[in-house]
Image (tube, rainbow, N blue to C red):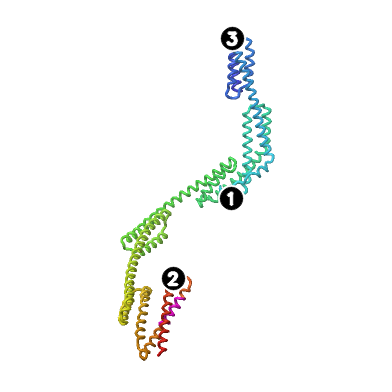
């Protein structure tokens, strides 16, 4: 019995004890008003029973004022009840229509259930567990079908709950329940069977997993197994399993997890012992490195010896048991020491370069002095006698020969002597040409001079040919090519002068 029906029975009992018709009628009207002002759906059955009773009591009300007041309230409440009844009937019709549409939609979808399942997208189960990879072809189609069936089951259950709450005729409501029951017959048996298949297979795989990796409490590959246990737990949540299978699987995986944690605890204990060894080795190596560094800073080790010692230190590091953190610290310290070595090595290289540049400058200055002396001798040679020129020349050659520089550095000096040799030849030729024509001695000297000039012409021609060959070769840069071209022109000009001198002497000798 509803609360409103109970209140009505209580009210009727109270009215039966009341003797005043006015009070009886007022109690009934107040009760009718309370039924309509209810926040929930109005209780029309009790309302109409109370109204009927009140209508009979109006005949007994004697006071016309009271009767008019109560009758006015009674009429308004009756109109409001009819208005509310019409509204609720419209709502009920609308809800019935919506329920009918919803049931029709799920009936149509379930009429071709296999086709609907085939249209579902494939599931990616590879993220859960590598151990289940070989079983994915078994789990995937079944879970894909279950995802759809679960959605249908939720819709059917939701429609049933909505029907229970709705106010409508019992006959209409029963028809809806019957249609939902038929739809459920298509969904729930198949869903139940699929859940059983997946549950049995998943439970068997979890048992196999435990037996394979946790037999006799021995744990192998803890890092791999930690991820696998998490993956299997995730798969258990993703798959639609029976409550019993889900509980048993979680229990088995929890046992595996406990064994894994125990193994990790033992591993951490062993790791702690290893870390103590690592720290001891690190301290020893740091001491060695500090000793090498102190000797280097005290200039007891050269940069070369320091680099050798650092290399030996690195080899010693490889032979010691060290952890990742210890290796990083030692490498950082070694890198700092290497920077000190590099800085000193760079400074020493700068000093060596500075010294070399100083020596090069001194050498160039000394060579420049000799070039100036040679040029001065060449410039003064026109005024000097042959013997004086040769004496000064020989003195310069002797001084140049005493220099400890490579031959290539002395080459410019040798080149600077060439004009002087030409000047000496010209002076000697001039002396010979000034002799009398019938002088036999002069003729002999002319022949000797001719031979000397021919030798010089031959040497000059060989030099010109060599320069031509070098100028015709490939691989020369522009500066070098220009220098060779200029030198070749100069040497050709000298060859032409020598050729003319030979011809002049030959003509002179031919006149004897």
* Residue stretch in magenta: 456-468
Element class at badge 2: helix
Query: In the image, 410: left or right of 148?
Result: left
- Classify mark 1: residues with Cα within 10 Å, few (<14), some (14-19) or many (20+): some
**In this picture, residue 191 sits left or right of residue 225:** right
For residue 67, the mark is none
Q: Which percent across, then down, holds residue 64?
A: 60, 8
Give me the residue at 64% from left, 14% from top.
Answer: 55
Q: Main secondary structure of the magenta part?
A: helix
Precedes in sequence: disc 3 or disc 1: 3
What's the distance in space between the residues labelled 1 and 2, CA to CA?
78 Å
Residue 26 at least partly seen: yes
- Relative horizontal placement of residue 365, taking residue 230 as reference (left or right): left
Mark 3 Cα shell of 10 Å, populated few (<14), some (14-19), many (≥20): few
Q: In which quarter of the image is residue 165?
A: top right
Q: Name the residue under label 2.
A: 482
Q: Quadrant of residue 356?
A: bottom left
Q: Residue at x 48, y 71 (%)?
A: 474
Identify the residue at horizontal 63%, vertical 29% (top origin).
164
The residue labelled by disc 3 is 65
Q: Where is residue 485 in the image (x, y as percent from the top left)?
A: 44, 73
Mark 2 vs mark 3: in front = 2
Q: Quadrant location of the C terminus?
A: bottom left
Residue wearing tag 1: 133
Mark 2–mark 3 CB contact (< 8 Å): no
């Amino acid at each position: 019995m509803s609360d409103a029906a109970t209140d009505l029975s209580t009210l009727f009992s109270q009215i039966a004890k009341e003797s005043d018709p006015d009070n009886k009628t007022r109690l009934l009207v107040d009760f009718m008003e309370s039924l309509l002002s209810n926040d929930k759906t109005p209780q029309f059955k009790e309302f109409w029973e109370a109204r009927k009773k009140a209508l009979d009591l109006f005949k007994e009300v004697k006071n016309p004022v009271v009767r008019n007041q109560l009758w006015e309230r009674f009429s308004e409440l009756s109109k409001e009840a009819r208005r509310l009844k019409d509204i609720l009937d419209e709502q009920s019709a609308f809800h019935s229509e919506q329920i009918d549409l919803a049931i029709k939609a799920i009936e149509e979808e379930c009429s071709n259930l296999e086709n609907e399942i085939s249209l579902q997208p494939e599931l990616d189960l590879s993220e859960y567990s590598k151990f289940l990879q070989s079983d994915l072809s078994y789990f995937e189609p079944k879970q894909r079908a279950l995802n759809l069936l679960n959605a249908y089951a939720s819709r059917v259950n939701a429609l049933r709950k909505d029907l229970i709450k709705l106010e409508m005729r019992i006959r209409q409501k029963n028809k809806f329940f019957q249609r939902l029951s038929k739809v459920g017959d298509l969904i729930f048996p198949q869903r139940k069977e699929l859940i059983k298949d997946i549950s049995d297979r998943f439970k068997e795989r979890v048992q196999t997993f435990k037996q394979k990796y946790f037999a006799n409490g021995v744990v192998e590959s803890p890092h791999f197994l930690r991820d696998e246990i998490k993956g299997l737990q995730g798969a258990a949540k993703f798959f639609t399993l029976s409550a019993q299978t889900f509980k048993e699987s979680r229990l088995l995986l929890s046992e595996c997890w406990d064994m894994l944690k125990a193994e990790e605890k033992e591993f951490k204990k062993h790791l702690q012992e290893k870390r103590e060894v690592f720290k001891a080795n690190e301290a020893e190596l740091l001491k060695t490195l500090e000793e090498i560094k102190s000797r280097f800073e005290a200039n007891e080790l050269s940069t070369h010896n320091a680099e050798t010692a650092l290399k030996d230190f690195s080899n010693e590091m490889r032979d010691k048991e060290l952890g990742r953190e210890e290796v990083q610290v030692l490498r950082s310290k070694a890198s700092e020491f290497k920077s000190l070595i590099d800085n000193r090595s760079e400074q020493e290289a700068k000093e060596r370069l500075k010294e070399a540049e100083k020596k090069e400058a001194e050498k160039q200055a000394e060579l420049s002095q000799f070039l100036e002396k040679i040029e001065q001798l060449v410039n003064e040679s026109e005024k000097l006698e042959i013997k004086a020129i040769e004496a000064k020349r020989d003195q310069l050659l002797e001084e140049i020969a005493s220099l400890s520089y490579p031959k290539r550095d002395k080459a410019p000096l040798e080149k600077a002597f060439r004009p002087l040799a030409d000047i000496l030849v010209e002076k000697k030729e001039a002396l010979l040409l000034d002799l009398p024509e019938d002088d036999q001695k002069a003729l002999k000297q002319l022949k000797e001079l001719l031979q000397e000039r021919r030798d010089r012409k031959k040497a000059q021609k060989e030099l010109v040919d060599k320069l031509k060959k070098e100028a015709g070769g490939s691989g020369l840069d522009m500066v070098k090519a220009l220098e060779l071209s200029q030198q070749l022109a100069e040497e050709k000009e000298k060859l032409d002068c020598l050729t003319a001198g030979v011809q002049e002497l030959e003509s002179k000798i031919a006149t004897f």
